[in-house]
Image (cartoon, rainbow, N blue to C red):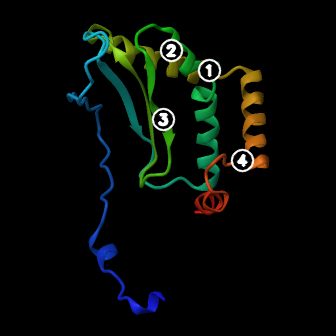
């Protein structure tokens, strides 16, 4: 059936360039539509992002970063998630932690529903929490729970309503 068509040259012409690495942090401030409901003073969103690598992760590194992502953000008791939500500085988490499905893996975390006066406080809270986790490590029980959760997830291979065959194909790539 497909032999009736000519191959498209779009793949040869379409290219996504790699994001260049910055030598210093870059701050981007943009406006976005926030709707009409709620407190007008708490409409800011703060998200801190890091480019983790120039190249896609190898399998072991990808698994390691996935494990770390679950430890920091994967459950309501995860330290980074808990500290951000309990801080009262914002309404909800933004950023999806580690994202390794793009050309270059990245880490994003922040809060939405932040007042303008608290933007810097959110940034400091994220950096202080990450530094504390780097210095002190994670609770042994949290590490074990994450290991059990990931092992169970891999054994069960429950894709919910997502097609299982498609899920297996995407995981194999």
Kindly report the distance in space between the C-alpha atoms of the residues bearing marks 2 and 1: 9 Å
Question: Which of the two labelled residues, at mark 2 and mark 3, occupies the earlier sequence position?
Answer: 2
Q: Circle 2 sits on which residue?
A: 85
Kindly report the distance in space between the C-alpha atoms of the residues bearing marks 3 and 4: 21 Å
Report the front residue among 90 and 106.
90
Kindly report the distance in space between the C-alpha atoms of the residues bearing marks 3 and 1: 14 Å
Q: Is residue 19 above or below residue 136?
A: below
Q: Circle 3 sits on which residue?
A: 96
Kindly report the distance in space between the C-alpha atoms of the residues bearing marks 2 and 4: 28 Å
Q: Circle 1 sits on which residue?
A: 76
Going 23% across and 28% down the picture, which residue do you hit? 33
Q: Circle 4 sits on which residue?
A: 158
* x then y, percent, for residue 135: 58, 20
Q: Is residue 51 above or below residue 58?
A: above
* x then y, percent, for residue 125: 44, 14
Question: Which of the two labelled residues, at mark 2 and mark 1, occupies the earlier sequence position?
Answer: 1
| Secondary element at tag 3 | strand
| Secondary element at tag 2 | helix
Given this view, does label 4 or label 1 mark the residue nearer the observer?
Answer: 4
Given this view, does label 2 or label 4 mark the residue nearer the observer?
Answer: 4
Question: Which of the two labelled residues, at mark 2 and mark 4, occupies the earlier sequence position?
Answer: 2
Kindly report the distance in space between the C-alpha atoms of the residues bearing marks 2 and 3: 15 Å
Question: Which of the two labelled residues, at mark 4 and mark 1, occupies the earlier sequence position?
Answer: 1
| Secondary element at tag 1 | loop
Kindly report the distance in space between the C-alpha atoms of the residues bearing marks 4 and 1: 21 Å
Instruction: Locate the C terminus by quadrant.
Output: bottom right
């Amino acid at each position: 059936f497909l032999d009736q068509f000519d191959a498209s040259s779009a793949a040869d012409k379409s290219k996504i360039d790699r994001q260049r690495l910055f030598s210093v942090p870059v701050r981007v401030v943009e406006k976005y539509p926030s709707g009409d409901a709620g407190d007008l003073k708490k409409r800011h969103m703060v998200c801190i992002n890091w480019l983790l690598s120039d190249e896609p992760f190898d399998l072991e590194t990808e698994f390691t970063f996935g494990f770390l992502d679950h430890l920091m953000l994967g459950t309501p008791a995860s330290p980074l998630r808990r500290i951000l939500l309990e801080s009262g500085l914002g309404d909800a988490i933004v950023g999806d932690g580690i994202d390794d499905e793009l050309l270059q893996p990245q880490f994003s975390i922040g809060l939405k529903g932040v007042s303008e006066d608290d933007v810097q406080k959110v940034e400091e809270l994220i950096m202080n929490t990450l530094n504390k986790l780097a210095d002190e490590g994670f609770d042994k029980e949290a590490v074990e729970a994450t290991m059990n959760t990931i092992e169970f997830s891999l054994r069960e291979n429950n894709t919910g309503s997502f097609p299982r065959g498609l899920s297996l194909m995407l995981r194999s790539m």
